[in-house]
Amino acid sequence: MLLLPLLLLAVIVPGGDNEDAFQGPTSFHLIQISTFANSTWTQNQGSGWLDDLQIHGWDSDSGTAIFLKPWSKGNFSDEEVAEMEELFRVYFIGFTLEVQDIVSEFQFEYPFVIQGIAGCELHSGKVIQSFLRAGFGGLDFMSIKNRSCVPEPEGGSDAQWFCVFITQYQGILRIIDTLLSETCPRYLLGVLDAGKAELQRQVKPEAWLSSGPTPGPGRLLLVCHVSGFYPKPVRVMWMRGEQEQPGTQQGNIMPNADWTWTPQVHWLDICGNNSALLDPFDMSCIMALEALVISDYLVSPRRVFFPI
């Protein structure tokens, strides 16, 4: 039985030389999922997100927003928040009735799902761009660009008809434009400031090694686990000396309940004949995480042995 010594060394590669290198999330968006089971049963779900971090929910029974963080209201006053809740409450009621009328008139088939996303994004720390997109039955349906409804190719003739239809309601389009171009940017800047202590925090991950199922004779599957880091941008690689090893594969990055992140696995399939594996060699698992200072995060090297 041969023991392969592996040096586990997790290192942060800094993304900048000052504290402003990491700015946290840069976008806010609302997600709507409306399920129409039949002509009498509809469910509207709503949520608000900073990038991949959820900060709002929607109670469809009471028609009120759920604030998941103490700073989720941003710099909006209680009166402004109440106005926005009333706006969305009326919107969901009107949206449901309007869709049901259209389905009845044009004999669309139940069940179906309508999805929408709308928000704004900060670019280069200054310019804020807004967006609104909708999907129908799992396909892209339409979007709002330059204050106009644009049908998506996947939406076909139904999307083209809808954009002609919605053009009749200029009052609704003006409200949408105001929300996207004025309300959303002001809220985004306010909530990023209100939540900056949590949004710009830096959480050091835990890392450990394991071996996976043997891929075949003369081969070894090494797995590097990294868990509980924040912010999200991360790259994990296997190094031998200063040379990155080809064949490194990374799983999806999954969220934890505390807003930290965990990649599923980072594995390296080492190929070679038995004689090449007889001599011990050191491998390093390197984690590159933007904007954390290298001296602030250095896991003490420790040797982990795997039988081959």
Image: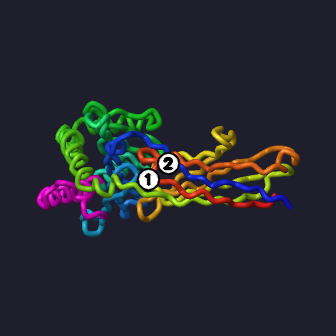
Q: Earlier in the sequence, mark 1 or mark 2?
A: 2
**Residue 143 drawn at (x, y percent):** 35, 37
Provide the secondary structure element on which disc 1 rests: helix
Q: Residue at x 77, y 52 (%)?
A: 220
Residue at x 30% of width, y 66% of height: 59
Most foreground residue, 63 or 241 = 241
Question: Which colour style is shown?
Answer: rainbow
Which residue is rendered at x = 16% and y = 60% of the image? Answer: 82
Residue indicated by mark 2: 12
* Mark 2: few/some/many CA within 10 Å (<14, 14-19, 20+): many
Q: Nearer the viewer, residue 124 or 81?
A: 124
Q: Quadrant of the N terminus?
A: bottom right
Q: Amino acid at mark 1?
A: Asp
Question: Is 281 drawn above or below residue 2 in the view shown?
Answer: above
Q: Are marks 1 and 2 in contact (CB under 8 Å)?
A: yes
Residue 199 percent location from the top left of the image: 33, 54
* Residue 72 image offset from top left, x and y in percent: 26, 59
* Residue 306 located left or right of residue 40: right
Cα distance between the residues tagged 1 and 2:
9 Å
Q: State whether residue 183 appears in this view.
A: yes
Camera-near label (1 vs 2) is 1
Task: Classify 10 Å Cα crowding around label 1: few (below 14), some (14-19), many (20 and above).
Answer: few
Question: Label 1: which residue?
Answer: 296
The numbered mark at residue 222 is: none
Residue 48 on the magenta segment: no
Picture coordinates of residue 223 (x, y %)? 67, 55
- Residue stretch rendered in magenta on the structure: 68-95
Q: Secondary structure at mark 2?
A: loop
Q: Is residue 131 left or right of residue 218?
A: left
User: Majority secondary structure of the magenta segment?
Assistant: helix
The amino acid type found where label 2 is placed reads Ile
Please check the rendered image and state whether residue 72 is part of the magenta-colored stretch, yes or no: yes
